[in-house]
Image: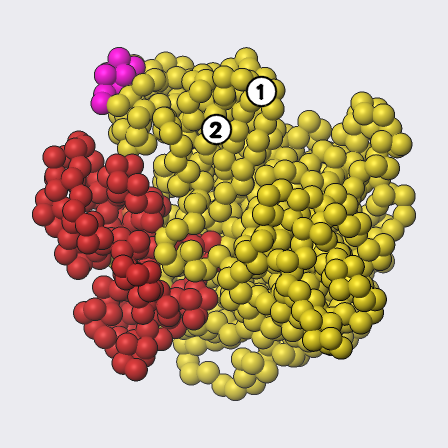
Amino acid sequence: MTRILSRRAFLLTGAAVGGTALVAGIGGVGYLATVDVDGLNGGAVDGDTAELNAFVVVHADGTVTISVPRTEMGQGIHTGLAMVVAEEMDLPFDERIRVVFPTAAHAAYSSWFNVLQVRPEEASGPVVWLARRVLGEIGFIATGASASTMSLWHPMRVAGAAARGMLVAAAAARLDVPESELRTEAAAVHHDATRRSLSYAELAQEAATLPPPDDPVLKPREDWRIVGRAQPRVDIPAKVRGAPVFGMDVVLPRMLHASIRHAPVFGAGLAIIHNERELRAMPGVRDVTVINGLHVAIVAESWWQAEEAAWRLDAEWTTTEADNESSATLSLRMKAALESESPYENIDEGDVDAALAAPDGRFVEAEYDVPHVTHACMETMNATAILREDGSAELWAPSQNRSTMSAGLHRGMDWAGVSPEEVTLNVTMNGGAFGRRSDADVIAEAAFLAARYPGRPVKVMWSREEDIGRGLYRSQAAGRIRAALGPDGLPLAYDARVATQSILNSVAGRNFPFNPGPDGDALSVEGLDKPYYAIPNRRMHSQNVPSHIPIHFWRSNGYSFNTFFAESFIDECATEAGIDPLAYRRSLLRDSPRHLAVLDRVAEMAGWSTALPPGRGRGIAIDECYRSVVAQVAEVTVSDDGEIQVDRVFCALDAGLIINPDTVIAQVEGGIIYGVTTALMSRLTIEDGAVVESNFHDFPVQRLANAPAIEVSLMDSNEGPCGVGEPGVVPVAAAVANAIHAATGRRLRSLPLAITEMIGERRTRSVLQQGDA
Amino acid sequence: MVAFTLNGRPADVTADPAKPLLWVLREDLDTLGPKYGCGVAQCGACRVLINGVSTPSCIVPLQSIEGADVVTVEGLEDEDGTLSIVQQAWIAEQVPQCGFCQPGFLIAATELLARNPDPTDAEIDDAISNICRCGTYPRIRRAIHRAAEMARA
Ligand code: FES
Ligand code: FES
């Protein structure tokens, strides 16, 4: 059996490359041994503030600053991880807690979990030892893969417990009593026997000079008061006042603004600007320049002025081999790739060919496909950079990845022939991210322009048209699945193949100094293998289909199409077998009790066995992703003329230990709406090598009026925390397609399931695509 | 020069009369609550109240608001910082995720409730056309109902 090359293996290879160079460069393992990967050492006092460790600062006024080195992009991570610290420290979870994304890249902040996929609470051994130190030293801090809670909940729990230990030790010294007689509550240390209490604010300065406890004592679960109970998000009071600073809101003295026009065809560059003099004469315009020989930047005193000029740009672009590409040619290549004689073999278990060839078996085969789509974060891409006269540089960006921030800043300045001496990186609030903000594209553009105007900050902001039409994309994909059903109607063999443009290959080509190549990209096949279904013979093949279109991480990556393929197909098998889709899946989950419990829960929520009136239907789908198990039932209404409305979506989620239940529910709600938009509405069209769509009028999204009602149920679970940012998206397309089949008897195998047209200025109507009967 | 009232205070702006109010607010008046999301009256992130009417400020030229009363998300709270009922309802329902679109939704909901103190679901569907990519719609619906209830109490 061929193993799937995991994301971990790939990244580890990359880390090893970087790590080897690093170790050689700075003195080897002896040096690495000194790296403080827990962040517990080095308490410090600075004026009124006492830093107890890399995560906790106590101020003299009683407020506490908690450092959460993960990007807040809407998922509530700043609240969830602060809750963990507050729990261990016995801090009331109220407005005295402040959360910041730290500017310094402490080794304890690194996202090594994302690479090793080993939970910190379970990690040991030399590989972990080395990787934590290397990734900590190179400042690999990333927010993505639904991994932030998994990566930091335990380390921050320990940091909270260590801080508490130092405060107790300081109180013991002050009161001259043994630590065992002290307890903590409500941000204070109490000596009950003598009824004396000292607040953390009073103790912090002394505590900061003490060593952390060797083995910080973690609070037993039964004593938890904060974790597991819904807490109000720390960022919401500012967000209802319009107060948070998103990247777009960064304002600096003497700042210049830039708007960009990228070549319409990806890979092309500027040939000539016909009206440069006219543009330069426009009000406020300071410069018309070309970034790295490719894209046109208009620099002005105001962004509006820059954008006004950019609209008037009359430019020609270089020709490329992709100038004749279209959605049609690309789809043909996808379809052809399904016939590839030499696909990459991801899985081959049992004897699939023998089972498929069995003469008396029933055979099911179906092909599916999805188009290119984009993220369309509400805040368009932007970054602000400055190169100071002393050679230092500073960057402000809504970014998911500190490493790509750094790389982008250096790359852009390098285009201008500058290499900054010292670099400060500021991660702002993100107006949505969905994977998009882990790329360095706009950051490099800002850095290039900043290098041209030393001493002046430059903010680059993309228009919505650039964001949708000249950005980064979730790839097209096509899938074909075949099964042979046994006498009981269940598959004896499952043979799945996906053709798509490798995500990792495209991302790595743009962002990393190394590239694992396109084959065996785990991100491109995830969701297709269905290992928890009891199917004796399984095979999974994948085929990379390169194109000129830049592919990027996109909320749930391969699951966003593979789960649509696989869970639609399982429904088709159930139909062929004449078995109810829920009962069919229950049989397939006979060896997977965790999955079965989630499936049963969602069926119960949805009242699966109750009848619906004509024109309405229910569909079900399940998957395991980001260590969570997620099942959904969608309920749809299809009118006689084919107009579709997704009325309700029920979701059961086993996401392990839940830190902040209400935020988890919000993430699932948001994921479902993101997924329903994509299933019903989203399609980008390629013509003459370029994306045709440009704004929300032709790339429509769900709005309040057509958003489904949603019910979410969280399972009690024995697992550690699992991912929650992406699972909500994963099953919804299949659940909706299966519901359409139940309502109409029509099996739709292509996304988007409907054609969406604008009715009036901001209304849409979605009518089902023609499908097979 | 164009003079108008911004969040209860007089504002005088000297800028291109064609400059959209959104950019006047953000670039000339340091009022960063209203956001750019599309520039073409599609998303509603830039909504402000102009004489009480929720309006996408990205398509309103500065010259057209002489003498108008403009309220942005920053102007929803009282002078003393007490949040409006709509803002309080938003907190109670924990509506915002990334929060970027929320200034526009808060404005749209404020106008709706001023005009219709107890809107039905259908009336909410009709009135609120903003876009939220984080998918906060179910909570926005709940928060509008809650605000209506709070106003009655
Ligand atoms: S920015 Fe004005 S409606 Fe989108
Ligand atoms: S809360 Fe993020 S776009 Fe609405």
For residue A620, the mark is none
Whether residue A140 is situated above or below residue A275 in the rendered picture = below
Residue at 43% in and 45% down:
A245
User: Regarding mark 2 in the picture, which secondary structure is present there?
Assistant: strand
What percent of the width, then of the height, locates residue A45? 66, 44
Image quarter of residue A162: bottom right
The disc label shown at residue A385, or none: 2
Chain seen in yellow: A
Q: Give x and y (percent) for residue B106.
A: 32, 60
Q: In the figure, is residue A308 to the left or right of A4?
A: left
Identify the residue under disc 1.
Answer: A420
Chain in red on the image? B
Question: Looking at the image, which residue is at 68% across and 63% down?
Answer: A89
Span colored in magenta: A276-283
Q: Position of residue B24 (x, y in %)?
A: 24, 39
Q: Amino acid at mark 2?
A: Ala
On screen, residue A346 versus residue A316, left or right, reads right
Name the one closer to the observer, A84 or B34. A84
